[in-house]
Amino acid sequence: MDKTFIKDLLVRGIIGIRDWEREKPQDILINVTVFSDTTRAGDTDDIAYCVDYSVLAKKIQSHAETSARLTVEALANDLAKICLEQNGVNKAIVRVEKPGAVRFAKSVGVEIQRSRDE
């Protein structure tokens, strides 16, 4: 399987379980790798056979900014579902981080892997 990725997509949204985390948007860092067969896209040079990472990034950003999830696990799961809805995507790895959420740590978060056949 070939990979298409979106690296370090920084969005602002409500995420967290504490009252103060629910009051105002905070930084959320998202990395996505989706797996598909890009052979036909490479042979034809036709966007119709590509994973449109611009469209995917917009969908991810919109959801992350509006979903107001409590946990990074739930948000990552949502985003994996969005990835798997894209034409030709068979598997997705989604990493969701909250930069600065833990003192003395650059970031904390979760990375999940989901497939169409799950």
Image (cartoon, rainbow, N blue to C red):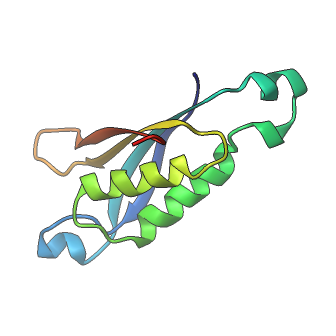
Q: Is residue 114 above or below residue 86?
A: above
| Horizontal and vertical percent position of residue 111 | 30, 38
Q: Nearer the viewer, residue 117 or 57?
A: 117
Q: Position of residue 103 (x, y in %)?
A: 10, 46
Residue at figure coordinates x 75%, y 22% from the top left: 39
Q: Is residue 43 left or right of residue 101?
A: right
For this rendering, which residue is in front, 72 or 99?
72
Q: Using the rendered view, name the quadrant where residue 1 is placed.
A: top right
Q: For residue 74, what is the image quadrant?
A: bottom left
Report how many numbered discs are placed on residues in the image.
Answer: 0
Quarter of the rendering occupied by the C terminus: top left
Give the residue displayed 38% in from the left and 47% down from the top.
29
Q: Measured along the vertical axis of the image, is residue 98 above or below residue 25?
A: above
Q: Is residue 118 left or right of residue 1?
A: left
Residue 19: % across, % down: 13, 76
Q: Position of residue 14 (x, y in %)?
A: 31, 69
Q: Is residue 55 left or right of residue 60?
A: right
- Residue 45 falls left or right of residue 23: right
| In the depicted structure, whether residue 43 falls above or below residue 100 | above
Residue drawn at x 87%, y 29% is: 45
Q: Nearer the viewer, residue 78 or 98?
A: 78
